[in-house]
Image (cartoon, rainbow, N blue to C red):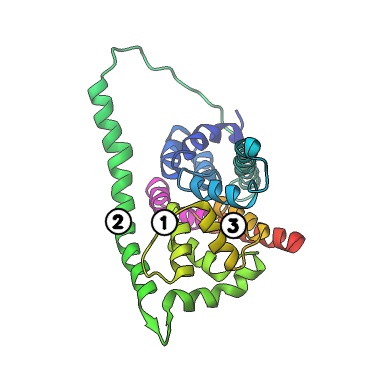
Amino acid sequence: METVDKIIYSMLMGFGCNACGVTGCRIIESPRERIIATVTNNFVPCNGRFPTLIAIISMFFTAGVAIAFQSLVSSVMLLGVIVLGVIMTLAVSKLLSATILKGMPSSFTLELPPYRKPQICKTIVRSLCDRTVFVLLRAISVAAPAGIIIWLLSNITVGEQSLCSIISGFLDPLGSLMGLDGVILLAFILGFPANEIVVPIIIMIYTSSGTLVDYESLSSLHTLFVQHGWTWVTALCTMMFSLIHFPCSTTCITIYKETKSFKWTAIAVVLPTILGILICMAINALFG
């Protein structure tokens, strides 16, 4: 079985959590193919990215659609984003397999375990320890200091500007090239601990609230974004960068734990980020 076929199993786990998807790459016996699956798992959207994608689609791409068809259009667009992520996963896997990780594809053998009486309690305990507690501990180890950093950046001021405003202003030129702005880029950077907090960070910086806040409704959030220069191109580029950018902190830690290599962890971070930047630049050049 080809490499691109093997990664499907771990890729499916990545839709729930990319860190779990990376852990699932253990089923691949070939070290070369295991690394390919590990590096490319982040290209499929996890649960942390779905709220951002759904919110943007609802605000900017289905608002003008008849109410009866809004759910259908939203579902089709979200499915299109997911399919794009799968295509990117397979394409980058093929690229890696043909270049820096070139080699002969190995055969795939799936052994069926002997039938035994289910041990429900043991299975639950092992699942909690191996797949829940360990992943949560890795998340907490980064989330706690990251929360302190976010608070400091939003509350420490230089002159009349917070550090968040100053940094986002510095990032504005790159953001403009990508069809975004400095605030959105900074939100993705500060959202490194968890993709779920990207939109709250954007709201925090736009409103100068000093703390992470959630939006009251999609209509109020849409108004806030439009007031700060968002267009459908900005929304599309934000969706694409949400789909294709660096893994979250938990996934990065898991990649290092699984590969024992800073090199492959760095590649797993840099590769999707560069591709995401280039794709956003191309979209902005065509439609911006």
Which comes sooner in the sequence, label 3 or label 1?
1
Gap between marks 3 and 2 measured at Cα: 28 Å
| Crowd band around label 1 with a 10 angstrom C-alpha radius: few (<14), some (14–19), many (20+) | some
Q: Which residue is mark 1?
A: 214
Q: Left or right: where does residue 158 sit relative to residue 180?
A: left
Q: Which residue is mark 3?
A: 238
Gap between marks 1 and 2 measured at Cα: 24 Å
Gap between marks 3 and 1 measured at Cα: 18 Å
Position of residue 239 relative to residue 207, above or below, is above
**Is 268 one of the magenta-colored residues?**
yes
Dot in front, 3 or 2? 3
Three-letter code, disc 2 = Ser
- Place residue 241 in its image quadrant: bottom right
SS state under label 2: helix
Quadrant location, the N terminus: top right
Q: Left or right: where does residue 282 sit relative to residue 130?
A: right
Report x, y in % for residue 198: 47, 58
Position of residue 81 relative to residue 160, above or below, is above
Report x, y in % for residue 212: 38, 62
Dot in front, 1 or 2? 1
Which comes sooner in the sequence, label 3 or label 2?
2
Q: Which numbered tag is attached to residue 141?
A: 2
Q: Residue at x 50, y 36 (%)?
A: 30
Quadrant location, the C terminus: bottom right
Instruction: Tell me the magenta residue range.
Output: 247-269
Position of residue 147 relative to residue 52, above or below, is below
SS state under label 3: helix
Q: Residue at x 26, y 19 (%)?
A: 119
